[in-house]
Image (spheres, helix red, strand yellow):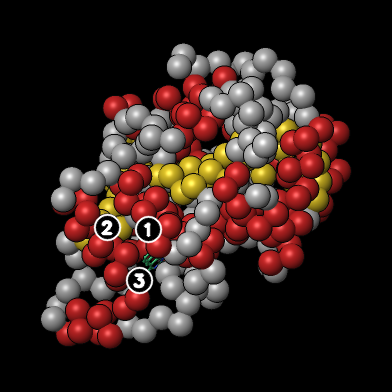
Amino acid sequence: MTAGPIVALCGGIGGAKLALGLYRVLEPDALHVVINTGDDFEHLGLHISPDVDTVTYTLAGIENPETGWGRRDETWSFMETAKRLGAETWFALGDSDLAIHVERTRRLAAGHRLSEITAAIGKKFEIRARLIPMSDDAVRTVVQSTDGALAFQDYFVRRQCKPVVEGIDYDGAGRAHAAPGVLEALKRPDLRAVIICPSNPFLSIDPILAVADIRAAVANCQAPVIAVSPLVGGAAVKGPTAKIFDELSIPRTASAIAEHYGGLIDGLIIDQADKDHVASLPVAARAVNTLMRSLDDRENLAKDVLSFAGELSVAPRSQQGND
Ligand code: FO1
């Protein structure tokens, strides 16, 4: 008998590291990764799904270890020529990365769904985990900032997260539905756990939870839901997470993360640097090493999360959804 699934909700770089740890310690086909697509956009005529690709490359072992996004040992002839032709070059597409965008765009234009394309590409890279974009419907993260409303990649890459964030919208989320496979996994009676990866809560996880049927299925699932805090001693490992907490006047604490996911989670994993907060948190918590510098760190964090999940009981959650 095969063991039930583990569902991981995941954004790009930080989330992909834990997804890899889980993939390596679990039976390979047990892992279902539900990936943020709020960062997706059209660039140079191509449909780019950055977080989907980051997870795909990371689980395939071909990710760029320096940037966390794009391909290892990348070359840049395409960008050099694009620059010469006067094309926009603020968002860099490497030569080998380019193939995934061209092929995805071609298949979308031929009427295939993003979820089918993602699964097919995962198979080509021999990934046995199920990689599922959160939705086949367009959901686009829009950052309300001191520079006005900015499309996600305009804020994140072109303006390097410099504008002050005043709010975040997930355009299209109200009309979007979970991609095939997401609700089926969350509703399985043998589901073992839902893990909210240590991705940016506002930019990477909230777009997924903004899709009502996903949020409801997480709220109503029978397995423990565990979030892994992206904060270590009040700082974020990478990216604008800490800056956004400050700009939204949210304290950079484990408690704030617990409250952010309040009513949806049964447990919170925090970093050992924050272990003094365990007792005062409003949910069951465990302090472990959450810094994922090495492959061992990723596997150890995955094991810690899974063993914590195995010990948690699921109380009726306050955020019940209608699914
Ligand atoms: N991030 C950057 O900071 N600069 C880039 O030029 C860039 C290009 C890029 C190309 C393909 C891809 O899949 C991701 C890319 N990213 C780039 C990363 C990405 O935009 C962000 O890290 C995520 O959207 C946030 O999770």
C-alpha span from label 3 to label 2: 11 Å
Tell me the residue that label 2 is attached to. 104
Image quadrant where one finds the C terminus: top left
Circle 3: element type: helix
- Dot 2, how many residues are within 10 Å of its Cα: few (below 14), some (14-19), or many (20+)? many
Tell me the residue that label 3 is attached to. 97
Foreground residue among 38 and 240? 38
Foreground residue among 27 and 118? 27
Q: Position of residue 240 (x, y in %)?
A: 51, 56
Location of residue 70 by image quarter: bottom left
C-alpha span from label 1 to label 3: 13 Å
Location of residue 317 by image quarter: top right
Foreground residue among 10 and 3? 3
Vertical position of residue 85 compared to residue 300: above or below: below
Tell me the residue that label 1 is attached to. 121
Foreground residue among 222 and 11? 222
Whether residue 105 is visible to the viewer of this picture, yes or no, is yes
